[in-house]
Image: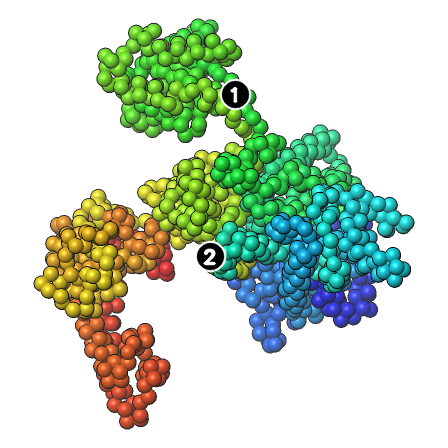
Amino acid sequence: MAFFQNSVLNKHLNAQDADAVKTAYQKFTAYFHNPAIQQNIRDAKEEQFQEGFLRELFVDILGYTLNPQPNFNLTTELKNEKGAKKADGAILTRGQDPLSIPKALAVIELKGTDTKDLDKINVQAFNYKNNQTGCVYVITSNFEKLRFFIHHSVEHLEFNLFTLSESEFKILWLCLRADNLLSGVPLKVKEESLLEEEKITKQLYKDYAAFRNDLWQNMVKNSSAKDKLLLFKKTQKLLDRYLFIFFAEDSGLLPPNSISRIVTRWEILKQEDAYKPLYDIFKQYFGYIDTGRKGQKTVDDIFAYNGGLFQPDEVLDSIQLDDEILHPHVINLTRYDFQSEVDVNILGHIFENSLNEIESITAELEGQEIDKSKTKRKKDGVFYTPKYITKYIVDNTVGKLCEEKKAELGIIDEEYAKGRRNRKKEIIKSLDENLQAYRNWLLNITICDPACGSGAFLNQALEFLIEEHAYVDELQAQLFGASIVFQDVSNHILEKNIFGVDINEESVDIAKLSLWLRTAQRGRKLTTLNNNIKCGNSLIDDPSVAGEKAFNWQKEFPTVFQEKDKKPFHITWVTHNSRTSQRMIDHKVKKGDAFWLEDEQEVVVAKTIKEIVEQDGLNVMAFNSCGDHIHLLLVCEEEEIPNIVRKLKGKSSQQLKEHLQIPKEEQFTLWAQKYSTTYIDLEEQLWNTVAYIQNNRLKHQLHTYTDNKGLQPLVSITESDSMQQSYNHAFRTEYKGGFDVVIGNPPYVNIVNIEDVELRKHYQTSFSTFKNKCDLYSLFIERSFILSKQNGLLGFIFPNSWLGTSSFSRFREKISKDVSPLQLVELPPGVFTDAIVTTVIMTYRNMKPNIDHNVILFQLKNQMFFQMEHKISLKTVCSTDNYSYSLEPQINLKSGQFKLGDIVNFSLGIKTSDDKRFIFNYKKDDNSFPMLRGKDIGRYSKSFNGEYLWYMPELIKEKAGGRPRVLEHYLKPKILIQDIAKTINCTYDDELYLVNDTINVIHEVKSPFTIHAVIALLNSKLCGQWFSRQFPEGLHIKINQLQEIPLPEVSENNISELTTKCIDILKFHSQLNSNTTQYTDLLQSKFEIEKLTTKLQNWYELEFKDFLKELKKAKVQLSLPEEAEWMQYFKEQKQKAQALKTEIDRIDKNIDTMVYQLYNLKDEEIKIVEQS
C-alpha cells in the first residue's frame, strides 16, 4: 500500500491552512531551491551543516523551537536512555505537563549529501528510536533527501528537498509541521489509512469474488463445453484481463475511463438499434490491447502491450456472456481507484480464494465432499508473505550480494559525491569503470523463487533492483554532473534477472500479472514472462511421478544452467621428492628424501580421495595408488581440474598427517606441487588408459591383495563403483551455473499428510534430508542449495519445527555441514493471519562452512528486527548427534569424565497396548501392582491415583506393540522421570510402583553417585535449562537424550550433601502433598465438588477472598458463620502449607547454587539460567 491512503490523505490535506502552506513553501523554495545554497550544502561536511539544517528547515519553516530557547521542542544530539550513543537530533514533547521532562517523539539522524544510500542508516536511526521510550517517528536525511517513518522501517515517505513541488511540500507540511507532529496528526493519518485500506480491501475482495462466481456460472450456462474446471480457469484469465484494464485506465497505460466509455458505447448502440453484446465490444478491446490501435486523439491511442494475457484464446473468444451479468460488475469495479486505493499485493488474497474455489469445484464435479477446514491454500501449505518479511529476506540476500560486489569494486558514495572538478582524469575513468562493472554485474544477477505463489518475493526483488539501478544512475549523475538514466531497466530485470516456478497455474498467472502491473509503462510492450515465470513441480523432474508438472530446471532455464563440456583426462601426481624436475636441475636444488606411502598409508589416502569423489559427485572411470604416485581418469570440464586436484591433494595430505599424529604446527609435505594432465581424445585411447591405470601396480611390481591382505581395503576402494564408473554414467549430461540468489516461502506440508504413496516414495529416494515426518519446506530448501551457484545466497521463511525434532536431523546436518547458515530470525506468532504456525527466517551462503562460524540471531518485534546478544556456535551444533539448534543462549556444562549414561541404567515404562485389559482401579489378583502414569509425578513428588497394572508379560506381548519390560527393574528403589514434559521432572520411588510408558525409569545408579544425588542434579534449574536448549523438541524426554547429560567432577562430600538435600526436599514435598490433599479431600467431600479447579487444587497460594470466589465457581455459597469458620481453618492450614513450601524453595535454591558451583558457572552464565 501507499504510505497514506489517498482519500484519507486528501481529507487531512484539505484541512490545512492553505495560505500558511503557500507562504511556507515560498520561504522553503527561496532557500532549498537556491542553486548556490544547494552547491554549498553539497560541499559542506556532515558536521558543518547539521545544526544549520535543523534551523533552516525545522525552525524557520516548520515552526519548531531549538534548544536552548525556552520551551524548546527540538534539540541536537539526544543521548540514548541506555548507553552513551546519541542521535543527531530529536523532536521532543512534554505531553500535557509543560513542566515535565521532555521525551523524544521523533529522532533525527543526519548524513552529508555524499551518503546516497539512506537505507544504510536505517539500523542506526531505529536503534536510537528503540532507545527512547514512547518514540513514534524517525527522520533521516542527507540534507538533500529526507525520509519520514512511523513506528517501523518497512515503508517511508521520501522528499527530495532540492526539487520538492508544492503538492509534495503540502504532505511534508502535514507530517512535519510542529503543530501537526506534536499533536499526533501523522500517526492519526496513518491509523485512519490502515482502517480505510482494510475496509476497501474487504469490499473489493467481496466484489471481485461476486464477479468471478457470476462470470463462471454464466460461462457454464452459455457454453457447450462440458469441462467446468476449464471454464473456471478461463474465468480466472478473463478476470486477470479486466484487472489489468482497471489498473491501466487509472494509471495512464490505457485511455482514462476505458471501461465506462465501452459501456456508454454499448448503451448508445442499443438505443440506435445497432445492438452488440457488451462482451463482444470487450473482446474487440482485448484485441486492441494485444495488437494496438490508433485513436482519433493521441490520448485515445491504445498501445500493443502483448505479454500473452490478451493474445487470442479459443475458449474466451468463443464464449457468450450475458449483458446483465457483465454490465453491473464492471461498472461496480471500475469505481475503485486502482492507482491509489488498491495495491497489487491484494492479489495475494484473491489468489488464495481462487485456489479454494478450484478445489471446491473439483470436489463437486467428482462427487466428493469438501472439507472446508482443509482448503487448497492450507492443503498446499501456501500462505501470502507480508511485505516486511519479503523486504528483510531480499535485503539480506540480494542486498548483501550487492554490498559485497560494491565493496569488491571499491564503490564508495563519497568518492562519487566529489564530482569531476579538480580531479585527475585517471581517477574519473577508474570510478566510471567501476560503476560500469557494477552495472554489468547487476544486469546479470539471477534471482529465483522456487515456490513463487502470487509473486510477493519476485515483486520485492524487482523493487530492490529498480532502486539499485536508480542508485547507480545517481552516482553517475554526481560524477559527471548530469542525469543519466539506464533505459528499460524494469523490462530488463523481468527478462534477465527474475525467475519463478509454482505448481499452480493460477499462481503463475497472478505472479505475471502483478509483475506487469508494477512495471507497465505507456507505450512500452509488456515482457512475456513465459521464459521466466513457469508452472511446474519444483521438486520432481520425472514425468512418471509428476506427470505434465514434472520440471527440469536445467532445460527450462537454459540461460541460468549451461551444459558442461565434459572430457576425459588422465591425471597423475607424485609424492614429495619422488621425482627430479627440470626446475630443480636448473636451480641446483638439493633433493631430499622421497616420501613413499606404506600400505596402511595408501589406504588412508585412497579412502580420503574416494570420500571426496562421492561427496562432490566426481566422475572417475579409473583410479590407482602406486606408492609414490596417484593415477586418476577424471571426466570433467578442463577448467575444473585445478580446483579438483587441489582439493584431492590437500584433503588427503591433511588426513594422512592426522593419521601419522604429526602435530598441527609442524610442517608436513606429502605431494609435489605440480601434477600431470593428459587429454584423451580417442575412445580406444580411453579404454587403454583405463587398463593402464588399473594394472599400474603390477607394472611397478608392487604388492597386491593376493600377497598382502593388508591391501584388501585399497583394492576395495580402487574397484568400488564410485572409482570405476561406467562410461554412460561418467559422460552423462551435467550442468553448471545456478542462481545467484534463491528466496521464498516454501509450502508447509508434513510428508505424512501427502496421500500419494508413490510421491512420498519419490521424495524419500530423491532427497537426502527426507526422514520420518519431515516437511515439504525442508525438501524445497535442500533443492534450492542445488539450484544456487557456489557462494550464492539463499533466504527463506519457514516453520520452526526443524529446530530440534528428530524428523529434521538430516536437514539440520545438511545446513550445518554443506552450507553456511548466516542469520536465523525468530518470528512471533501471527506473521500469517490465517496460519497457526510459528516461523523463522534463515539465510545461507552456498559454501562449506568454517567450523568456527557463528550464526547471528535476530528477533522480530513490531515489524522491527533486533539482533540478539548471543549467537549459535556451529561447532556446538555439530558436536551433538542430532545437530539441534536453539534460539536460547547456549549453556555449556563443564563436565568431568562421565555422562549420565555412564553411571546409570535406564528402563522404559511398560506399554500394554491394551490398557482396558491390563489396567484397573482395583487390585485384580496377586499379579496386580499399583502403578503410576507421567501425570502422577512431578519434581520431587508423586501421587497414587488408585490404578493397578495386571502384570501378565506373555499376554501383554500377544498384542502388537506390547512391551512388558523387566519386572525387577520396577520392584526396587528407583528414579521416575516424566516422559512427556518440556523439561526434566523426576522424583524418587521406594514404594515399588510399576509405571506405564509415560515414565522413564533409572533403576540402578553406580557408585560413588547415589539415587538421591542424581535426582538433585536432574531436577536442578541448570540441568533443566541445558536439556531444553540441547534438545528443544519439547515433546518427549528421551532416554538417549538423558544419557548425554554431562556430569560434573564431584567429591564424596558433594554427593553426600546433594543426597541429604534431596532427601529433605522429598520429605517436605511429601508432607505438603499430604496436607494439601487432606484439605482438598475435605472440600470435595464436604461440598460434593466433583472436580476441583486448578486454583482450588493449589488453595494455599490463594488469599481467602479468592478462595471464596473459586468456591462460588464450583457453585458453593457459604453463609457468614460458615465463612468465619472456614477462614480460621483456611489460615491455619495455609500457614502450615506455606511453611513447607518456603522450606522446599529454600532447599531448591541451595541445590541450584550448589550445582552452579559444581559446573563452575560464571555469574553471567548463571544469569542466563535464572532469567530463562
Question: Which residue does the numbered mark 1 point to in the structure image?
Answer: 566
Question: Which residue does the numbered mark 2 point to in the structure image?
Answer: 837
Task: Classify residue 967 as left or right of residue 125.
Answer: left
- Amino acid at dot 1: Lys
Task: Classify residue 1015 as left or right of residue 443.
Answer: left
Residue 587 makes an appearance in the image: no
Q: Residue at x 31, y 59 (%)?
A: 981
Neighbourhood count class around disc 2 (C-alpha, 10 Å): few under 14, some 14–19, many 20 upward: some
Task: Classify residue 911 as left or right of residue 841.
Answer: left
Identify the residue at the far left of this view: 926
Residue 228 x/y as whole percent: 62, 52
Q: Residue at x 34, y 84 (%)?
A: 1115
Q: Residue at x 44, y 11 (%)?
A: 687
Q: Residue at x 56, y 26 (%)?
A: 563
Residue 800 makes an appearance in the image: yes
Identify the residue at the far bottom of this view: 1121
- The quadrant of the picture occupied by the C terminus is bottom left
Residue 318 or residue 200, whichever sits in front: 318
